[in-house]
Amino acid sequence: METFYANKEISIDGLIEIEDKNEVVHAFASLRMKPDEIVEIINGKGIRFKSRVIDCSKNKLTVLPIEEIISDSEYSEVKLSAAVSMLNKSSKMKLLIEKLTEIGICEFIPFVSERTAFPKMSADSLKPSMISALKQCGGNAEVKISDTISFKKLICLNGFSEKYFADINGESFHGKKVTGRVLAVVGPEGGLADSEINDLVSSGFKSIKLNKRILRAETAAIVTASKFLY
């Protein structure tokens, strides 16, 4: 069943008009949606609705939510914030947010460290990729994409029950169960500087070993998320 994203409040029996160009073109030109077809609607706030198409034109898609869909696609015991040093290509960043959304993180925090090679990119440009992945994977709650921050600000973030960073020399994390609000940090290509690792440890972060091999930054981020969300 096709899923569409509506950036507005949704309620049963309340008409929803979707005017987002990407959503409308997909419905009208690609799927050729007709009245009375059944679709699913999300707004990224944790609920999915079974809905009936009322009208589909080249300008907007109008649907009527008729039933709330109960699903178990969100992680309730652990809420993972993934902090990743900016990658060197925007295409890599967009692919990464897609994969992390599919895995089930709740927040994505891009940051700039000493060895970050590509520090300039708008976090807003990642949202379309996040929404696309959310629709495809059956998720209901969108990932919060934070503004890019400095490493200094990153280590000062609080409100987490556990804080970790990926390190080839870290401790094995195999079989460990973590709950609560968790922050996991992945450094850039070439790794975090020794001084940054010392700062993380001093700030209460624990190191975790991901693999016997050295992983690319985007691979390390995906593996890190899968350690907590399974």
Image (spheres, rainbow, N blue to C red):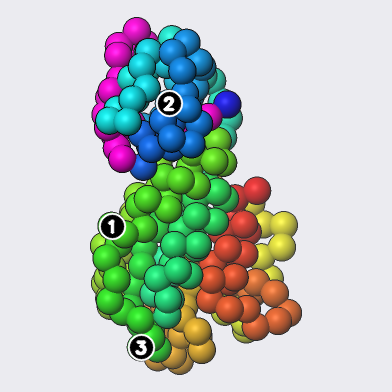
- Picture quadrant where residue 82 is located: bottom left
Q: Are marks 2 and 1 in contact (CB under 8 Å)?
A: no
The amino acid on which the numbered mark 2 sits, given as a three-letter code, is: Ile
Q: Residue at x 30, y 14 (%)?
A: 15
The amino acid on which the numbered mark 3 sits, given as a three-letter code, is: Glu
Residue that badge 3 annotates: 114
Residue that badge 2 annotates: 41
User: Between disc 2 and disc 3, whose residue precedes?
Assistant: 2
Marking on residue 124: 1
Is residue 156 visible in this depiction of the protein?
no
- For residue 197, above or below residue 50: below
What SS does tag 2 mark?
A: strand
How crowded pointer 2 is (Cα within 10 Å; few <14, some 14-19, many 20+) is rated as many
Distance from the alpha carbon under mark 1 to that under mark 3: 23 Å
Of tags 1 and 3, the one toward the viewer is 1
| Magenta extent | 2-21
In the rendered image, residue 115, in percent from the top left (x then y), is placed at 40, 88
Q: Are marks 1 and 3 in contact (CB under 8 Å)?
A: no
How many dots with numbers?
3
How crowded pointer 1 is (Cα within 10 Å; few <14, some 14-19, many 20+) is rated as few
